Amino acid sequence: MTELIKKHKWDIIVISAILLVAVISLTLVLAFRREGSLVVVSVDGVTVGEYPLNVNATYELSGATATAENPVTNVLVIENGAAYLTEANCPDKTCVTRGKIKYVGQSRTCLPNKLTVQIVGKDDSGFELVS
Amino acid sequence: MKKTKRLVTLSVVVSLAMILSFIESRLPTFVPIPGIKVGLANIAVVFALYKLGKWDALVISIIRVILVSVLFGNTVSLWYSLAGAALSLLLMILLKQLTPLSPVTVSTVGGIAHNVAQIGVACILLETNIIGYYLPFLLISGTVAGIAVGTAGALLVKRVNIKW
């Protein structure tokens, strides 16, 4: 056993270092998370809408694949301080299945529509590094 | 190695990588975080790296990414995947040549680099800074998946003894 450890000393060090970085960054993420106040919707990096998190509402969003006949590509719902996407016009529906977001920095992305929905705090510009 | 033999060998490993990618695309998503995946195709890349050499591994990796993106993905995912594959392979080649690390660890680091680079490129293209938020989850899942995939790759390297 000790020989095995000696032989794989560097492997053990590298794997432990990776896990250590993971634990530290996880602690930082959890320590600095706070509930957001705005939902920022952007398409291809351009902000197209900002919606307050404290107002329950449903918004129809137009992503990159929107056409004149089908202008709505995703549907955003804000409910009790949390935001989530209920509809997407793409087959994989990744953004829909990923659930609710409410903390600053959390986001949902719809790659086919180049659409991101991100939670920001009151004073954030929305593009700061959180955590 | 003769030209024909090399062509056939590379083709076989590319098809192995593609089959593994396909199986992975059929697996359900366990956790709702982008970038978290098993990385089965890394088995074939690690095998190529240790058995065929770094240039063949590079060729196999790039051809796999292009073919898989064309068949099961889209043009956007091609760029994420290429970035991931390139960084991952570069790191694996460096670790293999410069450190005494075992294939399992090399493969694990490569797998994590693949996922982190993919999310990184996605963040740059979409102009958001959410990578810090995903990092711990990517690292933890990448380590677990990487050790499993790396063990499979290392076994393959050890057991398959064909004279090329």
Image (cartoon, coloured by chain):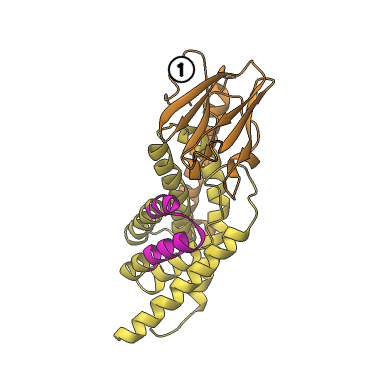
Chain colours: A orange, B yellow
Residue B40 horizontal/vertical position (percent): 54, 61
Indicate whether residue B70 is drawn in magenta. yes
- What's drawn in magenta, residue-wise? B60-82
Quadrant where the image shows the N terminus of chain B: bottom left
Residue A78 in sight here = yes
The kind of residue on which mark 1 rests is Asp
Q: Secondary structure at mark 1?
A: loop
Residue A1 in sight here = no
Residue A57 horizontal/vertical position (percent): 65, 22
- Callout count: 1
Q: Is residue B135 above or below residue A60?
A: below
Quadrant where the image shows the C terminus of chain B: bottom left
**Residue identified by numbered label 1:** A124
Residue A52 horizontal/vertical position (percent): 58, 17
Name the residue at the top extreme: A123
Residue at screen point 49% across, 74% down: B158
Q: Nearer the viewer, residue A114 or A120?
A: A114
